[in-house]
Image (cartoon, rainbow, N blue to C red):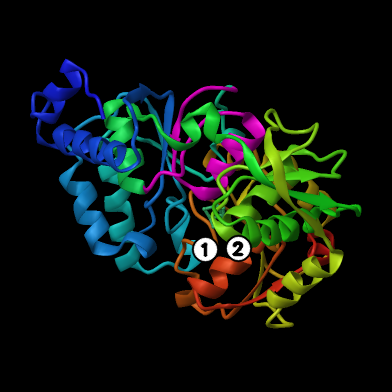
């Protein structure tokens, strides 16, 4: 990959050892993926923030890098706990101490202490056609598909490197020619809110890393598309989808593969994620809830069972009164918090992404139902 004189100088240590390392990571990625050059980006969203997922090795890495500064708007993915109300979550002192060190390392680099997988609900909404370097999978797929911004699915270190340099290698979804679908899914039935998450998971499991195109959906809210994208990212690493007449981009190759989706496939996925009947807790906010979603839950909730809602700090701070059986947590989520260590064995959710990772990362049993059913 071609580097300008200034970029070469950074690689050679002119701005210090850490920026040189960051430039080396970007240059190596660029060489591997055949990028022609680095391009400027407007924002970075950095995953690998929870102590549960990065452990001591990740903490040491971030502390090593903490004396240098990001040069663009940069935000964090959810941490392993609500940074202020972690005791209410039942988090141990040991975990909290390490988690707070991770946050300190990142904030000292200038990364905003806004830990969310939905930064677009918290004031960071990239424009159509803008280049960004985001790393949380559901945020990446939303940015590419719904907002029309351009990002690859970055790893934590590559997103952090991009934040420090302000640039990312020009390959993959940064190039128009790669934002074309090869596989079209035809939907011939009406979709409920839960169906969007189930459909996303199904499509993801078939499309894998390709860009799926969808026909047959006439209307969908951005919240339904958020659920679809998160499901597709969890089901098969999808970083972008397109829906005819709905998403900002819709381009398919000549003679694409065509798949008609049967409703039974969605039923099978729901069954796969129903492995217990009596959840210890009901959870919402995977991806993090918007203000409107939380209002809707507060207005309709009837159950007296304990509910956790996960959201960004920016959204949480808009609520003064919270119903008694609801805990509104920010900065974290039910997947990247050490939920399995605080006595929870079965969790209810309306999200296939949450169910997938709760089963596979946290080793929990899950129950997946619509939001309406869970709160009635
Ligand atoms: Fe967000 Fe956690 Fe789900 S990061 S998408 S709430 S697994």
Q: Nearer the viewer, residue 92 or 63?
A: 63
- Find ligand 1 in the image and state its quadrant: bottom right
Which residue sits at x=27%, y=38%? 31
Q: CA distance from mark 1 to mark 2?
A: 7 Å
In the picture, the quarter occupied by the N terminus is top left
Magenta stretch: includes residue 108:
no
Judged from the image, the secondary structure of the residue bearing numbered disc 2 is helix
Residue 189 sits above or below residue 140 on the image: below
Answer yes or no: disc 2 within 8 Å of ligand 1. Answer: yes
Is residue 124 something one can see in this rendering?
Answer: no
Say few, some or many: other residues with alpha carbon within 10 Å of mark 2 (under 14 / 14 to 19 / 20 or more): many
Which residue sits at x=64%, y=41%? 181
Can you identify the residue that label 2 sits on?
A: 354
Q: In which image quadrant can residue 36 be found? A: top left
Q: Which stretch is magenta?
A: 128-155
Is tag 1's residue or tag 2's residue first in the polypeptide sequence? 1
Magenta stretch: includes residue 143:
yes
Q: Position of residue 75 (x, y in %)?
A: 42, 36
Say few, some or many: other residues with alpha carbon within 10 Å of mark 1 (under 14 / 14 to 19 / 20 or more): many
Is residue 337 something one can see in this rendering?
Answer: yes
């Amino acid at each position: 990959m071609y580097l300008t004189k200034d970029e070469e100088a950074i690689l050679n240590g002119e701005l210090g050892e850490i920026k040189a390392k960051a430039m080396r990571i970007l240059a190596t990625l660029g060489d591997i993926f055949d990028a022609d050059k680095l391009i400027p980006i407007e924002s970075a969203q950095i995953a690998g923030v929870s102590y549960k997922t990065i452990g001591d090795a990740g903490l040491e890495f971030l502390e090593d890098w903490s004396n240098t500064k990001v040069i663009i708007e940069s935000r964090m993915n959810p941490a392993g706990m609500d940074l202020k109300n972690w005791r209410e979550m039942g988090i141990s002192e040991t975990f909290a101490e390490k988690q707070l060190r991770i946050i300190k390392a990142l904030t000292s680099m200038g990364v905003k202490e806004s830990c969310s997988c939905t930064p677009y609900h918290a004031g960071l909404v990239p424009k159509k056609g803008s280049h960004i370097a985001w790393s949380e999978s559901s945020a990446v797929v939303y940015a590419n598909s719904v907002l029309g911004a351009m990002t690859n699915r970055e790893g934590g270190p590559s997103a952090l490197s991009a934040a420090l340099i302000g640039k990312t290698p020009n390959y993959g979804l940064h190039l128009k020619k790669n934002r074309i679908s090869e596989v079209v899914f035809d939907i011939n039935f009406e979709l409920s809110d839960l169906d969007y998450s189930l459909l996303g998971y199904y499509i993801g499991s078939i499309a894998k890393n390709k860009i799926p195109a969808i026909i047959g959906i006439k209307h969908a809210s951005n919240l339904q598309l958020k659920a679809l994208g998160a499901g597709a990212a969890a089901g098969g690493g999808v970083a972008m989808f397109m829906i005819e007449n709905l998403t900002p981009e819709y381009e398919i190759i000549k003679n694409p593969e065509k798949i008609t989706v049967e409703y039974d496939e969605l039923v099978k996925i729901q069954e796969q994620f129903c492995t217990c009947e009596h959840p210890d807790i009901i959870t919402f906010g995977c991806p993090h809830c918007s203000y409107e979603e939380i209002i809707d839950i507060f207005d309709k909730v009837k159950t007296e069972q304990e509910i956790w809602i996960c959201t960004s700090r920016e959204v949480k701070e808009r609520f003064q009164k919270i119903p008694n059986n609801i805990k509104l947590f920010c900065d974290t989520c039910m997947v990247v918090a050490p939920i399995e260590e605080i006595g929870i064995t079965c969790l209810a959710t309306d999200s296939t992404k949450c169910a997938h990772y709760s089963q596979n990362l946290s080793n929990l049993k899950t129950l997946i139902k619509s939001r309406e059913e869970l709160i009635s």
